[in-house]
Amino acid sequence: MGEKDSQIRETMTKKSKKEKQVRKRKEALKRKKAKARALPKILRDEALLEALNTRHPLVECLINEEWQEEKVASILVIRDGSGGLVFANYLVDLAQRGLKDAWGNFGASRSDIELIKSKSSRAGFPLVPCDQNLAEKIVHGGIAWARKWGYKLPRECQVWTRLLAPPPPSEIDLGLFGVEGKPLYPSADLDQDVLDEELLSDDLQVSEEGFTKEALARIGDIKHALVRFAKSLEFTDEMNLAFEKRRGEPNPPDSEEDWIDFFDWFILEYELKEGGTIADLFLEHYEEIMSKDVRELVLGWQNVIEGLFEVKGVSGYAIDMKNLLNEREYRVFSTALHDDHGFRPGDFLYARVVPVMGFHLFSGNVRLLQGDGSSGEAFRAKVYREAMEMQARNPRLAFIDNPEKLQKSRDTVRKYHEAFVRHFGANEMIGTGKSILLQYRGFFEYLARNLRDPNKEDGVSPYSPEVELPDEVLASDDVGMLCDPVEGIFFLIDYGRFIDVFRSPEQHMGKAKAEELVAEYLTSDSISDVPLRRMAERFPLNFKRVIEQFQDEEGSYPTDIEDLMWEFKPWTFKKLPRIVTVLDGRMASLAKRAEQKPTSLVSRVKRWFS
């Protein structure tokens, strides 16, 4: 009986794990579809923007009757547009946050408007006629109040406020808001949270040599305002998704240093579900008061260059460095303004830098790599090897801001693809993990004999990862080794079974395993468009039949391969080669001498750069 119970428990455990995997894939599928089918940013809707215009006749302007006593104003503005009635509804919190919500529609009927009025009355906000000037002062005053105290404005407020002309700044009365000039419930450090509008509205100064101490201090204050703005947003769900994307697990970083780096990435680079980044929201929030060069400053911050840098020279607050990943040199400033940052020529740093008016700034933490006891030249060789392995693991970091390196890598991948097809007679091979490893090694031996770099004397050398495969791949009885002229060589588990689904759909359609396999290939961000494109090319009719099986309440997916890839794998339209060409021949040569790659090189963290 005990053995039988154990078998039952084991079966139930396997079933539970399988169900969780299926559920996870379905959830990923829904997220992909929801994101792909989301409407474009509302600001791009030209028909809507034409309808939302103060030149259209005003039909009604209404406000809740007791807005002064309740310190909450619900304002409804209706105009007679060319395509029918257009309206906007504004919710303004006069006690605390300012403009809290803004929404509306165009092409509305009179019954739509009456329904809105009725709902407002039932909710305890009966609407009465309001002077247009008063509505403009309340709504635009609510925007100014929110900006002053750092509260988040509605994402689409720029659209719907087009129905109300902004009054002259001198006529905006912030005395309508808060208590004694402050929000009703101020935070303990409220005085420090007030944004000085001149911080964003004044021009920035830069010389040919770089930034003055005063300019760096101001840029640091602008970054601090961005961080403070990000912390004021409600993004719990977004943060959990970001943990998974950045760290591979739904948990926050353990250390303060890792948290600072994560938050810097989250603010500047993470794409929100509603589109754009938090930095984009910051730009929209303060668009009306922000000078052109401050706007360009914040826009530039989103072009982060993350890399392993070698310090070449130091001059005051400026550090001249070479990024060993993309092989570009930069003059980088710190807004921390320490008299002695401690860096010297020959030091190696791991850092994030962002472009600013022809120069660069540190963003997030800066980590100093220190020697491991080996000689200077031996340590340098280990760092160079680490840099080349980092390029191979993450080509995006290697190609950013260096079009020459990208083009040479593309040329190298194209040559590898041509050699692969010559060697194997096909652009893919299928077998067990162990047999594929032998073929993979054999291919590189073939390259060593037949694909010499004609520019070797110029120091141009391709770098590829060590000829090994993960244990999961080695243990599989069905592995595909694919070679693409853009991506290069990559490996897929269950590739033979994946092909069989499209070769003989009548044998697989309706079976859970086949559907799960296709769903995994379709939704996984680690699998590119190549296998799906190959199926669409080889089995065009069967491809359509298989894809049509994946339906939900919203309807079937597009069966055209281009539309399907735009929906599920839009990132593949800008994919990068998986082989990175190293331009610096000395770095490549020295890296080959390294006995082993460096371990635990990061021994100090410059927290004052955060």
Image (cartoon, rainbow, N blue to C red):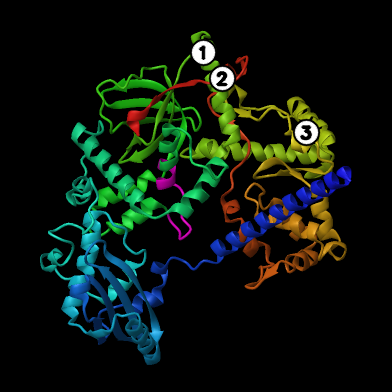
Q: Quick one: label 2, few (<14), some, or many (20+) residues within 10 Å?
A: some
Relative to 271, is 108 above or below? Answer: below
Q: Is residue 64 left or right of residue 40?
A: left
Depth check: give the residue in front, 574 or 526.
Answer: 526
Q: Nearer the viewer, residue 485 or 9?
A: 9
Please report whichever mark, 1 or 2, sits nearer to the chain's N-terminal start.
1
Residue at the disc numbered 2: 598
- The quarter of the picture where the C terminus appears is top left
Q: Mark 3 = which residue?
A: 440
Tell me whether circle 1 and circle 3 mark residues in contact (CB < 8 Å): no
The answer to whether residue 220 is left or right of residue 231 is left
Residue 82 seen from this side: no
The segment highlighted magenta reads 264-276
Rounded to the nearest angstrom, the CA distance separating label 1 from label 3 is 34 Å
Residue found farthest to the bottom: 110
Q: Which quadrant holds residue 170?
A: bottom left
